[in-house]
Image (cartoon, coloured by chain):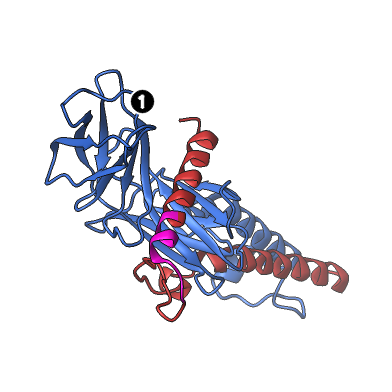
Chain colours: A red, B blue
């Protein structure tokens, strides 16, 4: 067998295996590598800030209501 | 030349190299077959990729598939991205933001309430969300004398009334009523022009009456 054909065949095989490795490895990574589960933040009112907590709570509620309305519209509900 | 099956059996090839053209072709075919047949299975079980990934579970830790998950950037109220959870409850967004919020919104007729994760930063690359179980509550909004109030705005609130978030929006019908999905310890707020806003907290599934006082 000519050396050139051998080299081509070897290169083809190595290329195919490299492509496979690149495609497959990220999908095999376990969930644990992507971060530990933790509780979602429940809000972060900074006590040191001189803010009206009632107004902040109302703003947060209004914003979440507006976002919920937009979600209903996007989802066609 | 040594046949491919002879190479697998350990017979040395006659050429200088250990890989013949047929051997190389066999490897390429094998790799191609694995790529076509094997990778879809691997993809099915592997988590989605993205700048922000997360998982939606119910209170017992069971994955919630086919839940709509929306990402809101900064102070924006329109979703920047929309995706859905896979069979394992996992989701991914392609882009992260300096300040963002995530809402998991289950189907309308479900036994779960929505869940929020608010005030997130790029450090929150993994966003776990737990959908609270929903209690079906038949809410009636009335005047002090018991007359039904039509078209009152209703909002289901998260349990933390110091910083409440909206979980459901609705309006009362002509009988002043609406059926809502309320999480345990959650509340229902009601407001309509001409009356002071009112809040009621159901003790369990069933009826909840919210009387409103006239706005004098």
The residue labelled by disc 1 is B151
The C terminus of chain B: image quadrant:
top left
Rendered view: B110 above or below B151: below
Magenta stretch encompasses residue B198: no
Residue closest to the eye, B9 or B80: B80
Q: Which residues are magenta?
A: A50-58
Asked which secondary structure carries label 1, the reply is: loop
Residue visible at 46% across and 43% down in the picture: A68
Q: Residue B147 in the image: x percent, y percent?
A: 20, 23
Rendered view: B37 above or below B175: below
Residue visible at 76% across and 76% down in the picture: B15
Question: Could you tell whether B207 is left or right of B26 in the image?
Answer: left
Q: What secondary structure is the stretch in magenta mostly built from?
A: helix
Residue B42 visible to the viewer = no
Residue visible at 18% across and 32% down in the picture: B144
Q: Residue B42 in the image: x percent, y percent?
A: 49, 57
Q: Residue B156 in the image: x percent, y percent?
A: 31, 44
Question: Could you tell whether A16 is left or right of B11 in the image?
Answer: right
Check the residue under mark 1 and report the chain it is in. B
- Quadrant in which residue A74 is drawn: top right
- Quadrant in which residue B197 is drawn: top left
Extreme residue in the top direction: B174
Residue visible at 71% across and 66% down in the picture: A13
Question: Could you tell whether B30 is left or right of B63 in the image?
Answer: right
Question: Could you tell whether B52 is left or right of B170 in the image?
Answer: right
Magenta stretch encompasses residue A51: yes
């Amino acid at each position: 067998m000519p050396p050139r054909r051998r080299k081509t065949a070897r290169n083809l095989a190595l290329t195919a295996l490299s492509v496979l490795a690149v495609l497959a490895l990220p999908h095999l990574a376990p969930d644990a590598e992507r971060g530990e589960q933790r509780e979602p933040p429940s809000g972060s009112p900074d006590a040191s800030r001189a803010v009206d907590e009632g107004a902040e709570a109302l703003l947060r509620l209004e914003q979440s209501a507006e976002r919920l309305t937009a979600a209903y519209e996007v989802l066609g509900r | 030349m040594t046949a491919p099956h002879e190479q697998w059996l350990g017979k040395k090839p006659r050429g200088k190299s250990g890989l013949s053209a047929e051997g190389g072709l066999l490897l390429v075919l094998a790799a191609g077959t694995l790529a076509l047949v094997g990778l879809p299975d691997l993809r099915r079980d592997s988590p989605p990729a993205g700048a922000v990934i997360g998982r939606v579970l119910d209170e017992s830790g069971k994955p919630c598939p086919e839940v709509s998950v929306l990402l809101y950037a900064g102070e924006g109220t329109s979703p920047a991205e929309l995706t859905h959870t896979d069979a394992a409850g996992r989701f991914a967004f392609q882009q992260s933001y300096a300040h963002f919020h995530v809402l998991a919104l289950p189907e309308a007729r479900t036994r779960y309430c929505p869940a929020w994760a608010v005030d997130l930063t790029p450090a929150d690359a993994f966003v776990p969300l737990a959908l609270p179980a929903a209690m079906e509550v038949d809410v009636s909004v009335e005047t002090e004398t018991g007359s039904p109030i039509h078209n009152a705005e209703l909002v289901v609130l998260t349990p933390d009334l110091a910083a409440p978030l909206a979980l459901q929006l609705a309006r009362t019908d002509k009988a002043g009523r609406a059926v809502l999905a309320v999480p345990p310890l959650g509340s229902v707020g009601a407001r309509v022009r001409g009356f002071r806003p009112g809040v009621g907290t159901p003790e369990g599934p069933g009826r909840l009456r919210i009387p409103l006082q006239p706005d004098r």
